[in-house]
Structure formats: structure tokens, C-alpha cells
Amino acid sequence: MHVLVIIPTYNERENLPGLVRAVLARDDYHVMVVDDGSPDGTGEIADQLAAEFPGRVEVVHRTGARGLGRSYVDGLMRALAAGRAEVICQMDADWSHDPQYLPAMVAAARSHDVVIGSRYLNGVSVVNWPLQRIILSAFANRYIRSITRLSPRDCTSGYRCWRREILARLPLDRVVSDGYAFLVEMLYEASQRGANIGEVPIIFVERRQGVSKLSSGVVLESVVTPWRLVFRSLLGAPR
Ligand SMILES: Nc1nc2c(ncn2[C@@H]2O[C@H](COP(=O)(O)OP(=O)(O)O)[C@@H](O)[C@H]2O)c(=O)[nH]1
Ligand SMILES: [Mg+2]
């Protein structure tokens, strides 16, 4: 089965080479790096990897406004247009999403439209987060689930595997949010279209190299987005 793993990057030079090699350890897995013009040269490192693994590593160099949501929209639309991948995964570049979980997630995508690598299936499986960040994330998930009625335990995990058919039905060009809110919006749109959502437990380990790009603006957007999604769906059927 052709599996494509999309990895958005912004200043991940220490993390990317090892991670890409780990993903490519499986023969049918492919990688698309979506780099946002990282000042640290991550884009060039990705190009070197593409040269080293021809046909298996593709690099998208974005210019203009940077953003995690925008990068995913670009990457996903390209992956759909190319038409080869049956399962399209998304994961962070910083090793928080260990590639060892990919086979279980891809296997679960045989019977689910989307599979989430979930931190909150068995209690809280997060390593090296300060207590306040655990509380913030756990609270955010409760908040999102109660407003949107989404069922997954972890609606803000960026580690996911999608069947291409469901992705192709999402209004990717219309998604407006970035950061965590983008992840919630995608899930919400999928569930509005009747997607069968699965979860596989993962242990999320906070990055050891590089820095997080989490900002207070991103957190604020996550507060507003669930309400926006619910009101939008009340105003009109999903297209
Ligand atoms: N292309 C792109 N990638 C980004 C951007 N911001 C963050 N990322 C990537 O998104 C992933 C998660 O970001 P990270 O800073 O680790 O967020 P955190 O895990 O929530 O602290 C990493 O692979 C980052 O390199 C961005 O603006 N553009
Ligand atoms: Mg991270």
C-alpha cells in the first residue's frame, strides 16, 4: 500500500534527516517535506534527502506567509492531485510523533477513514511536558469535544493517517484556521461527512532539539474555532 507521510518543517535541521530515514525504513512509505523557508537551512537538508532517496522524498518549498495549517493544506492538495498515495499521514518533524507507531496507524486506516495517534486514550501519555501544558491540552480537548460533540479523546493531535477518499471530500481550500485549530477543523469537517474516526495510542515525547513554535495567538484561535465550526454547520450543510 502506497503511504505518504507529510512532514511540515520550520527550523528542524537537527531532527529531519534521522526522522525521514526512520519513516523510509518501510519500503512502501514515502515522505513529503513542506518547508516554510526555514532560516536554519532545513529546506536544503530536505533537498539533499530528496536527492538521496529519489522517488521517495519530495520537498515543497513554501514562500510568503508561513503557517502550519497553510503548509498542510498545500501538502495535502498536492498529495491528492498526484493521486498515488492511498493513505496520507501527517506528523511533526521533532520526534514527538515516533515513526514506530505508523504501521499500527496505517493498519487501522484499513477500517477507518482517519486514524489519530492519540495521547489521551490510556490516561495521559505525554513525556516531558510541564504540568501547565498537560493541563492546557487536556482542558482544550474537553472543551473542544463538549462544544463540537467530536468523539475522539485527542482532537488536537497532529499525528494522523487519512484514507485519501475522505481527504478528497474535505473542503481543504476553505479551511481558514492555523495551528491546533486547523487540526480541529479538519476533524470536524471529516466527522460532518460521516467519517469513521479511529485512535491508536501513542506516547508523545516533547522535542529534545529545536524550539516549539506554539504561540498565544494559536491558543486563542483554538478557543474560538469550536464555536465557529458549530455555528457554520448550523448555517449550512457541509459541501
Ligand atoms: N511548514 C511549517 N511548519 C511549521 C510551522 N510551525 C511549526 N511547524 C512544524 O510543525 C510541527 C509542530 O511544531 P512544534 O513547534 O513542535 O509545535 P508543538 O509540538 O505544538 O510545540 C514541527 O514539525 C514544526 O517544524 C510553520 O509555520 N510552517
Ligand atoms: Mg513539537
Image: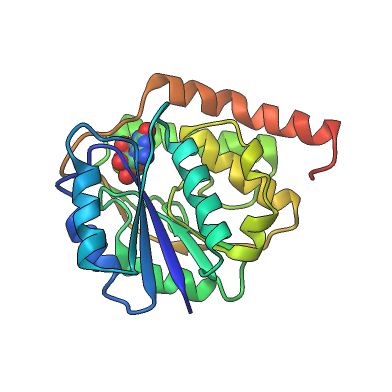
Toward which corner of the image does residue 238 lie, by quadrant?
Answer: top right
Left or right of 92? Residue 220 is: right
Toward which corner of the image does residue 86 lie, by quadrant?
Answer: bottom right
Q: Position of residue 184 (x, y in %)?
A: 57, 41
Q: Quadrant of the C terminus?
A: top right
The residue depicted at 34 percent of the width and 69 percent of the height is 55
Q: Position of residue 230 (x, y in %)?
A: 73, 33
Q: Vertically, is 11 above or below 50? A: above
Toward which corner of the image does residue 50 lie, by quadrant?
Answer: bottom left
Q: Looking at the picture, tell me which residue is in the foreground, 203 or 216.
A: 216
Q: Is residue 207 visible?
A: no
Q: Looking at the picture, tell me which residue is in the foreground, 214 or 28.
A: 28
Q: Vertically, is 219 above or below 2? A: above
Left or right of 23? Residue 195 is: right
Q: Looking at the picture, tell me which residue is in the foreground, 36 or 16.
A: 36
The residue depicted at 56 percent of the width and 25 percent of the height is 223
Q: Position of residue 13 (x, y in %)?
A: 17, 45
Left or right of 4? Residue 239 is: right
Q: Position of residue 176 (x, y in %)?
A: 59, 31
Q: Is residue 12 visible?
A: yes
The residue depicted at 53 percent of the width and 29 percent of the height is 222
